[in-house]
Image (cartoon, helix red, strand yellow):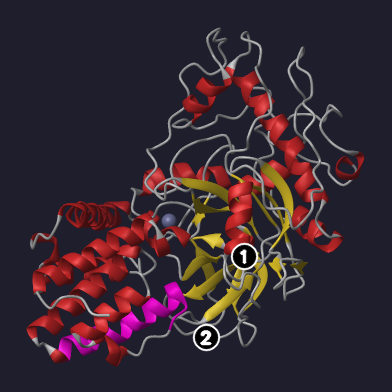
Amino acid sequence: MLLSWNHHHLLHSINEGYHAAMLSGHGLLRATRLTIGIPVLTSGVGLRRPVLTRPRHAGTADPKMTIEKFEKALGSLDMPALPYGKVEDTGQSHTPTITSRLSEGLCSGLPSGLEKVDYPKWEHSPGRLDYHDTTYIHTSQPMRFGSEGHVTSPLDPETTECFISGLFKRKIAATPDIGTRMLRPTSITYRISESPGKGLGLFATKNISAGELILVERPLIITPRNLPSKRDHIPKNLTLHEMQQVFLHDAETILQYTVERLKPDRKEAFFKLANSHLHDGSGPIMGRIRTNGFGIGIKRSNEADLEEYCVVCDHSSRLNHSCSPNTFRKWDLRTFSMQFRAIRGIKQDEELTTEYCDLLIPAHDRQLLLDHHQMKCSCAACSNPAASDPRRRQIYEWEQRNRIVARKGFDNDPLSLMRLTELLHLLISEQLEVTEGCGQVLFMLILLLVERGDVLTSEMLAQPYSTYLLATTGVHVEPEALLTLEGLSEVAMRLRL
Ligand SMILES: [Zn+2]
């Protein structure tokens, strides 16, 4: 299907397409790394979150505080370390199976006067789908449904233990070919070894080409970013810290059920993951989710609204952060897997990296977010913020401008050839091939050049754009197919760009 050949209309349509992609398809399937305190936080999808600040009234009793207000308050606040430092196991919050295997970071108990809430340990029927949208259930996924509606096993032996809403479970069940066999890399591409100052990391065992598949994994667990509370009320005399304690305690209780359902080898893999939240009241499970979780968003029925989840994997959770990452990660619902491809060529023995935070905010703000992972970034951009910050700022401003244009209609300004060429230079100098902006700039540049009949330059850009598409969508598009307006619009529609 082709778009109209009116140039302005074409640009506008494609721009609209970009906007749609940012709000729905590919843009949101792109998994984001969790950078926040605890799962009751209610901020956005993980991108461009306001710079976090400390709660002004932390530690003081607030007689008017309710759970709802508390959750709202946390929406824009960083959770400070709890005042009592490393907390001791009170024996209240863990089943013997779990306490016996752990010696660190145990969750504090409940403030005195509060009863433990009994969360239902639902071993529900795997085939059941008639849950309310907001009812949360423990379930093993992906389940496949046979022609007569009966549940069958996934094609790959690994299953993910999930604590998800009825809505999400129905989305999984309704996904065509759910549980399709995962596409694996054709050869071993990485090893896990010590990364100086960062614990373990993944390193390339060979030269890897841009676009090449590096790692595909079925997650160990998926849990909500905002865990639902079963408590009707909490006493009004609790301090913010005590409320935090209640939420962390209750969250840990729920998550125990999820982790207890893991098969022994997968449970062991989960507990081998790093926990950088040993001193803030997180339990051992919550601490590991906060350290290792990638964020994904599932569309609610009104499309613009998202349910957010944390995805914890085994090997890929060991990927370290870089502000110029060399892999692109993507959550694929159909194969129920987290996938990583090289966004640029990677040399043998080079460390493989992903991003834990928004890459376009200033270095200082990135470091605040990375503090949650107890890591200090020493990448080129962080080492020289005076040079890097203004470049990233320009890219950010262009992305924002492009969004507004996409929303309001065609405007020639952000699409000018010179501006786009400048942006491409900035993106390359900052090694930000992983950003959506990079794909947008390449696409628009090729579009303008094809329209102007500049065959040589558009040919030069078609190959990098084809590689970008492979790395970010897994789809191979011949560079030649990108050299006509028909080809470009077909690609944009096919990939929902
Ligand atoms: Zn950095």
Can residue 33 be seen here? The reply is yes
Mark 1 vs mark 2, foreground winner is: 1
**Residue 455 position (above or below residue 91):** below
Disc 1 residue crowd, few under 14, some 14–19, many 20+, Cα 10 Å: many
Residue 238 appears in which quarter of the rendering? top right
Mark 2: which secondary structure? loop
* Residue 147 image point, x, y percent: 69, 73
| Drawn side of residue 87 relative to residue 171, left or right | right
Whether pointer 1 and pointer 2 mark residues with C-beta atoms closer than 8 Å, the reply is no
| Label ID, residue 316 | 1
Question: Which portion, as a residue range, is magenta?
Answer: 456-475
Q: Observer-nearest residue: 143 or 405? A: 143
At x 25% / y 58%, what residue is drawn?
395
Q: Main secondary structure of the magenta part?
A: helix
Query: Which residue is at 63% across, 76% downward?
Result: 182
Quick check: can you spot residue 196? Answer: no
Q: Is residue 454 magenta?
A: no
- Horizontally, residue 407 falls left or right of residue 105, namely left
What amino acid is found at the position of numbered circle 1 in the picture?
Answer: Ser
Instruction: Identify the image quadrant of residue 141.
Output: bottom right
Look at the image and tell me in which quarter the N terminus lies: bottom left
- Determine whether, in the image, residue 468 is placed left or right of residue 404: right
Tag on residue 207? 2
Q: Position of residue 219 (x, y in %)?
A: 67, 62
Question: Quick one: label 1 or label 2, which is nearer the N terminus?
Answer: 2
Question: Can you tell which quarter of the image residue 458 is in?
Answer: bottom left
The picture places residue 201, in percent across and down from the top left corner, at 62, 65
Q: Amino acid at mark 2?
A: Asn
| Callout 2 crowding tier (Cα within 10 Å): few <14, some 14–19, many ≥20 | few
Foreground of the two, 117 or 490: 490
